[in-house]
Amino acid sequence: MSNAIIKQTAAQMADALADGTTTSVALTQAHLDRIAAVDGAVHAFLHVDAEGALAQAAASDARRSDGSPLHQLDGVPIAVKDVLATEGLPTTCGSKILEGWIPPYDATVVARLKAAGLPILGKTNMDEFAMGSSTEHSAYGPTHNPWDLDRIPGGSGGGSAAAVAAYEAPLALGTDTGGSIRQPGAVTGTVGVKPTYGGVSRYGLVALANSLDQVGPVTRTVLDSALLHELIGGHDPRDSTSADLPLPDLVGAARQGADGDLSGLKVGVIRELAGDGWQPGVMARFTESVDLLVGMGAEVVEVSCPTFVHALATYYLILPAEASSNLAKFDAMRYGLRVLPEGVESPSAEDVMRATRDAGFGDEVKRRIILGTYALSSGYYDAYYGQAQKVRTLITRDFEAAFQQADVLLSPTAPTTAFKLGEKLDDPISMYLNDLATIPANLAGVPGISVPSGLADEDGLPAGMQILAPALADDRLYRVGATVEALLERQWGGPLVDPDKLDLPPVELVETTGGHA
Amino acid sequence: MPEITRDEVAHLATLARIDLDDAELDHLAPQLSVILESVASISGVAGADVPPTSHPLPLTNVFREDVVVPGLTAAQALSGAPEQEQQRFAVPRILGDEQ
């Protein structure tokens, strides 16, 4: 029996479960088989929980046959970024300092997945503590881009994006602090959403930078992201930064957008997020996508956000400052790694901390902790961290002015397509530039989506279009994203990620070992 | 032009409780200087009249009802501990010879 069912969208899988043409066990097994066949090459997963996922799938099938599914997505499997706490499953954040740690509790978003009956396939690879744009900073080795295994899958959530692009999972959770959902989406030809700050609970998310982090969906289609976003979103009393407001109708917006009429909608193209350094093939696909929206009745205006040119510098002061404080909790005392310094008799707690943090943290984490410690130091605080907080205000004002002129803002998601593994590993500044277009949204707390815009002419690799909306207007992302997707898929004859054109064995070569569909 | 010296990096590493060896200091110090140089461009971008933003949501205090909810058991809380003793986290000595 073929496992071609994994080529479907999550929404189609949910329909197939609802009408009884497949079972969750068959669906989950088909994905586990795909993981077994290709993950040796992709390395999207740090941990695969076949046994747990199949048990959850069997329970889901029992609910379906009783006529009592918990949710539309009950039984559709999902992968979870390894920065989210999962009770009973390892959670490493891509770091040696948390190797072997098994959380005694679930993140709220994970608890919501479980309460809706989604089998959890495993935990996905990431740059250590979500610091990076290539997944190369994972202490457990990089993830490879399914389009070209010699290239990066983006980061920090390269594992989630690659898992979805490689058809190892129909859905995944990611986190986005400066683009870690959207940039991997762009370079793997998948969809990724950073919700409004406060729109999705962060309880149980190992924090990188509290004022920037947000959990969001990683999928192959806009509708699938909307379904997942509605499932994980909404107020959580355990997260004091969670917004106590109802979510807009995201699924409805995605369905409306797929029908295509954008009359009366104003889209703003951000002048500062284009120009020198932007790959011509990425810009070409972006411009074509904007033209498609105009063809559907949208009015396009050019908007200027002059402070965005300072967003990268602002971010690389605020993020390290917050991260250096957050990572102080890895002190070798209550959980995680403990390393005793060599040649020290009766070492003190501080000696043990220093030795542990040296052995447990990788280069990028050390760079950012030191930078953050510097930015927060007495004598430098006003010049760096204080100034960055003020520029953050100006960036937020730029957004406010731009949203006076347009309902959504557009830019390419990332300046280039996926680069080669190793190319920028020891050149931090060049690595940081990948997040140029995604960072402003995190600084202002506004939501953003990346949707595939096509393949760049130079290298045949995927490029993405970013759509940004005002805070709490996440529905606009789904409406406009679904329109772009529908128009482009009509041109392409299907989704951009064709499972049989990846740098991987075709889906049909893998036979399922279990299940009855 | 801001510069961060090797000695400063060593001092910051001490503050951040990370043992960096000589090879790491040689490697990280020049990289940090380059990063610092590029982020220093924001000085002077915002005037004194611009208020700082620490957080994108205009939240102040968040209150909830004071009700008892289940928490972790001692065994769960200690499940990740590198070392434990009598239902407590066992840690290395916390006082130095000179204290």
Image (spheres, rainbow, N blue to C red):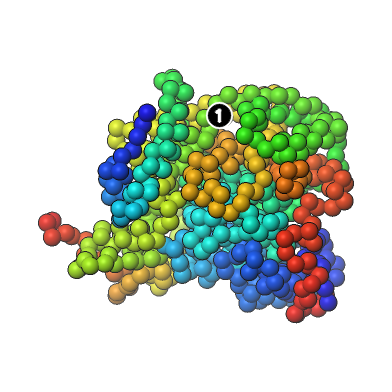
* Quadrant in the picture for residue B44: top left
Q: Secondary structure at mark 1?
A: helix
On the image, the x and y values in percent for residue A500 come to 80, 61
Q: Position of residue A109 (x, y in %)?
A: 59, 57
Left or right: B53, with A374 as reference point: right
Residue drawn 74% across the image and 72% down it: A30
Residue B68 seen: yes
Q: How many marks?
A: 1
With respect to residue A36, does A480 lie above or below?
above
Query: Left or right of B38: which side holds A419?
Result: right
Q: Amino acid at mark 1?
A: Val
- Residue plotted at (19% across, 68% down): A345
> Could you tell me which residue is drawn at 51 percent across and 50 percent down?
A425
Residue in front for this viewpoint, B48 or A253: B48
Residue position marked by numbered label 1 in the rendering? A309
- The residue depicted at 66 percent of the width and 76 percent of the height is A55
In which quarter of the view is residue A28 placed?
bottom right
- Residue A78: percent from left, percent from top: 67, 63
Q: Is residue A452 visible?
A: no
Give coordinates of residue B83: x percent, y percent. Answer: 33, 72
Q: Determine whether, in the image, residue A169 is placed left or right of residue A392.
A: right
Q: Quadrant of the N terminus of chain A?
A: bottom right
Image height of A223 relative to B53, above or below: below
Q: Quarter of the image holding residue A468?
A: top right
Q: Residues within 10 Å of mark 1 (few under 14, many from 20)?
A: some
* Viewer-proximal residue among B51 and A273: A273
Q: Please, which chain is the residue tagged with disc 1 on?
A: A
- Residue A204's place in the image compared with A381, above or below, is below
